[in-house]
Amino acid sequence: MRKTKYIILFFTILLSFQRVIGQDESSNNKLKTLLIYNFTKYINWPASYKTGNFVIAVLGNDNITPEMKKMLSTKLCGEQQIEIREYPLVEHITKCHILYIPSQSSNLLPKVMNAVQGKSVLIITEKNGLIDDGACINFIQTANGKIGFELNMKETENRSLSVNNTLSNQMASRVVN
């Protein structure tokens, strides 16, 4: 219980920090990178995904990739070293744990859904409406200007990923079942 309070406090401070540092792209990329890293602590992948590197991939060329490499290159997910990859095209997607689809690549979501069908890939997007089109997590801007996220429980479970209740009940801005 005490750990949960600290986790909630961390996310509250993190989201409040965004207001202090402003809304520029660099700040947003740092915040999104931290959130993506923290998702790894609340989502469990199947045993077959717990060997080798933990791969976080970005579809297309996006400014978040250098930030991810800078912030996550020395981090672990459990005992797995985090590796950041860029996939310029949907056809290049190979085994990954998290696939981040920036807004400029959001039109590729239907192709991505076909490419990762039956795989335990957490798909994270950042464009309104994509949570209803197959994204597991979608970044949104809340009414007070902060970055929040929506969580699609059904899609996440369909991908054989289990979500800790703390993430779904206390941190998500909106949960879709």
Image (cartoon, grey):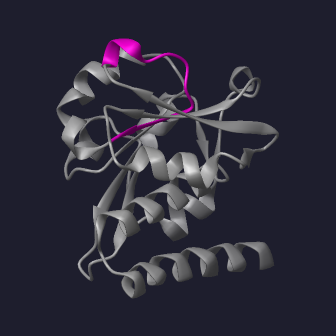
Q: In the displayed structure, does residue 173 sit left or right of residue 35?
A: left
Residue 92 colored in magenta in the image:
yes
Q: Position of residue 81 (x, y in %)?
A: 74, 37
Spot the residue most to the right. 79
Q: Is residue 177 visible?
A: no
Q: Position of residue 39 (x, y in %)?
A: 57, 52
Query: Tag count in the figure?
Result: 0
Which residue corresponds to the image point at 33% horizontal and 76% vertical from the top-left? 146
Which residue corresponds to the image point at 52% horizontal and 49% vertical from the top-left? 68
Q: In the displayed structure, does residue 102 sit left or right of residue 137?
A: left
Quadrant in which the N terminus appears? bottom right
Spot the residue most to the top. 91
Span of residues in magenta? 90-101
Q: In the displayed structure, does residue 106 sit left or right of residue 82?
A: left
Q: Position of residue 95 (x, y in %)?
A: 55, 19
Q: Is residue 43 above or below residue 142?
A: above
Q: Return the residue nearer the eye: 121 or 162.
A: 121
Residue 59 colored in magenta in the image:
no
Q: Is residue 170 above or below residue 37?
A: below
Q: Position of residue 122 (x, y in %)?
A: 49, 36
Q: Is residue 155 above or below residue 64?
A: above
Hey, which quadrant is residue 88 in on the image? top left
Q: Is residue 136 visible?
A: yes
Q: Return the residue nearer the eye: 157 or 142.
A: 142
Which residue corresponds to the image point at 22% horizontal and 27% vertical from the top-left? 108
Which residue corresponds to the image point at 19% horizontal and 48% vertical from the top-left? 129
Q: Return the residue nearer the eye: 168 or 112.
A: 112
Q: In the displayed structure, does residue 53 sit left or right of residue 156?
A: right
